[in-house]
Amino acid sequence: MPVAKRVKPSDFFTPDEWTTLTRRYRFMGPALIAHCWGIILLAMALAIWQPLFIPLSIMLIGTRQLGLAILEHEAAHGGLYPDKRVNDILSNLFCGPAYGGSLAAYRPYHLQHHKYAQQAEDPDLILSKPFPISPASLRRKIIRDLTGQTFIKQRRTQIAHAFGLGLKPGPGAENRSQTARQAVMPFLIFNLLFLILLTALGYGWAYFVLWLLPMATWFPLVTRLRNIAEHAVTPDADDPLRHARTTHANWIERALIAPYWVNYHCEHHMFMHLPCYKLPKAHQLLHAKGITQKMEVQPDYITVLKKACTPRQLPPSIKET
């Protein structure tokens, strides 16, 4: 069972540089959570004030729902707060319940992804292995995301598993059911309380239009784009500088696709214990040393999508989804 190859920080950074990069600030995790929720609430207020902004607010809120998932990912690496207990509490209160994530279930799964990145044992390999796909297949996937089909399929499966429905008996069935319950119950409680709060304020409709609708449409789309950008059609599964991708993002892409430095994914896999807010500095240092020329780095998300949907010939017996 081969593990993914690692790099040594000392091969890339001086001791002083590494000390600076690994320093974690107590205020940053709470500040990022406050920033994420601040944008969500401001986008809601904007659309309530002027309904013409509803489409923009849906995109902003859906991206910050992804932001909550990214911050939970940060918590899985202990990056929200230096104290592990506080780190986990922040995630379990303010990140996972809102969108349906569970830190307890996600952390071991995700660390296995890092251990076996792009190897046969990587649990996320299913997300990248099908690529490249045809442009028509990518369009179908985007349509399913934006019409809520992806959301309904995923939530229906998650809720069914949480209540022991649709699970084949056998080894691991109870564990999968328990894992689903860890995510579903806080999710249902949070969303019920959020609906009650907005209704009490006289804006019950906003829950459905400005919270549930972004979660059912834009959130699945940007999650898919994130997954494609991170590992799809990367050049070398055995090269720790090229089995994950960094994608440069302008301010529009950061606002609507890639919040909280999630686009620096190659650096994240190279140095997985760096806090997310140090990844741009790591990239800057690596670029100055000429290392980024050896890494998988792309100029924007359009370029990545073009690489991921290169037309290919499939045997007649295989139908692309």
Image: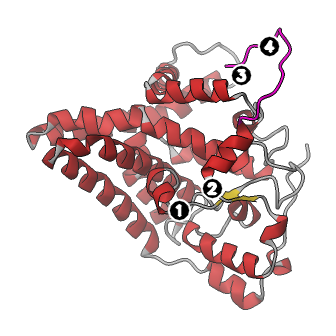
Crowdedness of circle 1 by 10 Å Cα count: few (<14), some, many (20+)? few
Residue on which the image places disc 1: 250
Q: Which residues are magenta?
A: 309-321
The residue type indicated by label 2 comes to Asp
Nearer to us of marks 4 and 2 is 2
**Residue 135 locus on image (x, y percent):** 67, 29
Residue on which the image places disc 2: 300
Q: CA distance from mark 4 to mark 1?
A: 38 Å
Residue on which the image places disc 3: 171
Q: CA distance from mark 1 to mark 3?
A: 46 Å
The residue type indicated by label 1 comes to Asn
Q: Earlier in the sequence, mark 4 or mark 2?
A: 2
Q: Earlier in the sequence, mark 4 or mark 1?
A: 1
**Residue 37 locus on image (x, y percent):** 33, 56
Q: Earlier in the sequence, mark 3 or mark 2?
A: 3
Q: CA distance from mark 3 to mark 2?
A: 43 Å
Q: Is residue 43 above or below residue 307?
A: below
Quadrant in the picture for residue 14 = bottom right
| Residue 290 is one of the magenta-drawn residues | no
Discs 4, 2 touching: Cβ within 8 Å: no
**At numbered mark 3, what does the secondary structure look like: helix, strand or loop?**
loop
**At numbered mark 4, what does the secondary structure look like: helix, strand or loop?**
loop
Q: Quadrant for the N terminus, please.
A: top right
Mark carried by residue 318: 4
**Residue 20 locus on image (x, y percent):** 63, 85
Q: Residue at x 55, y 34 (%)?
A: 179
Crowdedness of circle 3 by 10 Å Cα count: few (<14), some, many (20+)? few
Crowdedness of circle 2 by 10 Å Cα count: few (<14), some, many (20+)? some
Quadrant in the picture for residue 128 = top right
Nearer to us of marks 3 and 4 is 4
**At numbered mark 2, what does the secondary structure look like: helix, strand or loop?**
loop
Quadrant in the picture for residue 299 = bottom right
